[in-house]
Image (spheres, rainbow, N blue to C red):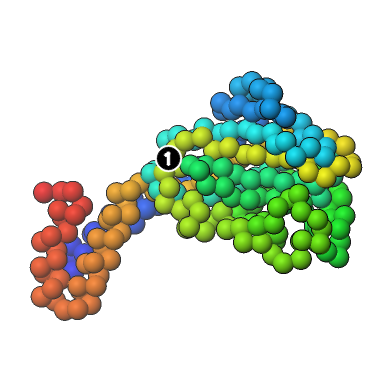
Amino acid sequence: MKKPLLSDLIRIEALAMVQADLFIQTDGSLSGSGFTAGTQSGVGTFNQTIADGNASVMWNSISVSGLGRSLSAISVTLSVTGGNNSGLYAYLSYNGTLGVLLNRPGVNSTTPFGDTSAGLTQTLTGTPLYGGVSPLSSTASFTTPGSSTPLNDNSLYGGMDPNGNWTLFFADVSGGGGDATLNGWSLNITAVPETVNVALAAFGLIFIVVVGGGRGYRQRTRVSPMVNGTA
């Protein structure tokens, strides 16, 4: 009587083995759009300027399609050159949910000038130390860590359908160091079909019944094919 349970588990594990998909936005790849200081810059335009000391954000979008319906993991890679990193502020927006990526790197009450290097190439899955603090706040405000949620926290994007437009917003809120340039960015998304989630939940029920005793297992195995959508 253990064979049906084992075959169900193997089938579920095979469905759940979903590769992460990489979506790259650079000049000429994938459809994107953006503006700087409120002026439309056109579809596919890239290498966009992040104006020095200008709180008006520029933005760029990546259109995601062909993935499963339930996001399980995400990371963002940014490529920026020039400027002064300590003034950078960036966040990801999708489906009405915002995830802070950068918030004035290195700035805090003891190092008010922060990271003064020019440019960065960085993959982000979490949140900056002071992600919940307004980037326009005084450096003294960067003392107590903010309350931003990491990108991979299930309460942020977890379980959402990732197929749609993901938008990156960028600004340099502190003058000095000149303009920076967003050269490109990418999303690495892992998603599974909703049917896999249902199957995993069904397997969980089967496992509980098996632990409870053989009789319950026999009753449950007659029901599980209906859950899996087979006759």
> Callout 1: 10 Å neighbours few (<14), some, many (20+)?
many
**Which residue is tagged 1?**
67
**On the picture, is 47 further left or further right than 2?**
right
Q: Which quadrant of the rendered structure holds the N terminus?
A: bottom left
In depth, the one of 80 and 149 nearer the eye is: 149
Question: Relative to 81, is 39 above or below?
Answer: above
| SS at mark 1 in the image | loop
In depth, the one of 52 and 166 nearer the eye is: 52
Instruction: Please state the horizontal and vertical placement of residue 71, each as a whole percent of the image.
Output: 44, 49
Quarter-wise, where is residue 177 in the image?
Answer: top right
Instruction: Please state the horizontal and vertical placement of residue 171, each as a whole percent of the image.
Output: 73, 40
Number of numbered discs: 1
In depth, the one of 69 and 33 nearer the eye is: 33
Which residue is depicted at the point 86% across and 42% down?
A: 175
Question: Relative to 3, is 228 above or below?
Answer: above
In depth, the one of 108 and 75 nearer the eye is: 108
Does residue 79 show up? yes
**On the picture, is 33 further left or further right than 82?**
left
Does residue 6 show up? no
Instruction: Please state the horizontal and vertical placement of residue 161, each as a whole percent of the image.
Output: 41, 43
Which residue is depicted at the point 23% across and 77% down?
A: 211
Type of amino acid under label 1: Leu
**On the picture, is 119 further left or further right than 224?**
right
Question: Relative to 145, is 46 above or below?
Answer: above
Which residue is depicted at the point 56% across and 54% down?
A: 151
Quarter-wise, where is residue 34 in the image?
Answer: top right
